[in-house]
Amino acid sequence: MLMQPQLLNLIPLMARLQQHAQQQPHQLALQDHQRSLTYAELYHEVSQLSLQFCQMTSPRIAIQLDNSVQWVVTDLAILAANAVQPTVAIPIPSFFSAQQQQQVLLDSGANLLIDAAGMQPLLVAQPAPPLPLGTVKVTYTSGSTGTPKGVCLSAQNIQTTLVALDQRLGELAVRKHLSLMPLAVLLENLAGVYLSLWRGYQVQLQPGAKLGMHGAHELQLSSFFQALNQLQPHSLIVTPGLVKALVYGVQQQYLKLPDLQLVAVGGARLLPELERQALALKIPLLQGYGLSEFGSVVCFNQPTTSTATDQVGTVGKPLDHAKVWLEQGEVVVSGNAMLGYLHDPSSWYPTCIRTGDWGEFDEHGRLLIKGRKKHIIVTEFGRNLDPEWVEAELTEQPEIYQAAVFGSETLPLTGIIVAAAEVSDSAINAAIAKVNQSLPDYARLHAWHRADSVFSINNAQLTGTGRLRRAEIAKVYAHYLSSERLFV
């Protein structure tokens, strides 16, 4: 067994933590609502836990915790232990349904669970699925079809993105970062926690409920504003839905954040008008773009242009590690591709990733994202959703004959429902409520409207094979699909 310092120093992030522990031992590294760790204490705890993991046989460790000091310590210890033997982190998103969370445990072959009850061995009924060589983290997408998909990443994937982000931030001095997104979201895990620790900053960690955030779609504004005013972060990573909340809070003078220096936006497309509002209010907003399959971040705007309006609508230039080009309008990236998808060896070790996003470059080389190739809905809180999944669940109910589901960064999930005339509105409400109970929160309908007629080939709302013509349906029912969600 390697000695403790040697073990940690095999991973650059661990070597940087050791450096901070020596040079600023009393500087706070992590703080949640129950405890805090200095850099010296963090290095010690990660060291001890990583040695414990090294004594296990090829552990695949599921982390099912709310944002906390323990989440970060566990995750870093897995990263360190992986330098000695195969040790894999499997973050379980809190916004997944109970069924999806259980599916991730089974799908990943996790043999150890760390949750609020502590460390628990898991019985594995079948051989664990093989992983690409070098896998240290399996990060699950939000499951656009209801089936979460595991993206396998290496320590090198993580480190490469980390260094590129550090270079892009340059001299921007952010001393205190507040994690708003669940740490199971790779963007927050890497660009929030890892980057802050790499630069020697403090990371504030709070359970979602203490921030007024419940699941992937609900935000209680009063609690959200209270938490931000109390914690006074210097940086945040947010989705477009949270940008709307920040703008509202500043406009109404509910929010006062004099030390806020960076609000990085990712997860979904930000409306240009909302971006202009934020910049006019001196909210230091910067858009970025990325995907889990590329180690999270691909592009990010320069902090030096955070108050400029010429960047509005763009997600910035590619980071130094990323090569980005367009093929027939689709964004393609290379330079830090994932190791592959779990259960799909044909996807292993790709040289480039076709993103499925339409894009273009402006005259300064900054990327603009123009939409998705498929009909995937990106919700206002950054979750990907295949509407056909929800539609199938809805039409399994006897009260609902047909359903078309729409949504966007500004429109909560809304259904156009076809039902027999004798089916009352209250019966449809009950059927939708039943479906919503079985779905994760980001996939639940927030509004519905009766269709004027059945979707059919005759009215051009169905194809010859019976698939919905979404553009035609959206045009007919545009008056139901144009309003923005109001926070209450």
Image: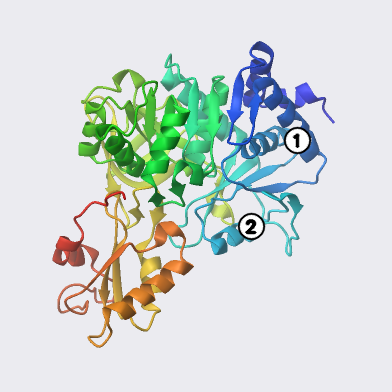
Amino acid type for the residue under numbered disc 2: Leu
Which residue occupies the foreground of this view, 357 or 54? 54
Which residue occupies the foreground of this view, 25 or 327? 25
User: Quick check: 483 left or right of 68?
Assistant: left
**Residue 18 position (above or below residue 58):** above
Which residue occupies the foreground of this view, 148 or 47? 47
User: Quick check: 273 left or right of 6?
Assistant: left
Q: Nearer the viewer, mark 1 or mark 2?
A: 1
In this view, which residue lies farthest toward the top? 23
Residue drawn at (76%, 22%) of the image: 5
In the rendered image, which residue does mark 2 sit on?
105
Question: How crowded is the residue under tag 2: few (<14 C-alpha within 10 Å), some, or many (20+)?
Answer: many
* Dot label at residue 134: none
Displayed quadrant of residue 241: top left
Image x and y of residue 274, in percent? 24, 38
Residue drawn at (50%, 46%) of the image: 209
Image x and y of residue 148, in percent? 52, 57
Residue drawn at (20%, 38%) of the image: 273
Which residue occupies the foreground of this view, 295 or 428? 428
| Residue 10 seen | no
Q: Calculate the distance from the C-alpha at mark 1 to the C-alpha at mark 2.
A: 22 Å
In the rendered image, which residue does mark 1 sit on?
49
Which callout, 1 or 2, points at the residue further toward the start of the chain?
1
- Quarter that holds the N terminus: top right
Image x and y of residue 85, in percent? 75, 38
For mark 1, give the secondary structure.
helix
Contact, mark 1 vs mark 2 (Cβ under 8 Å): no
In this view, which residue lies farthest toward the right? 1
Amino acid type for the residue under numbered disc 1: Leu
* Count of marks placed on residues: 2
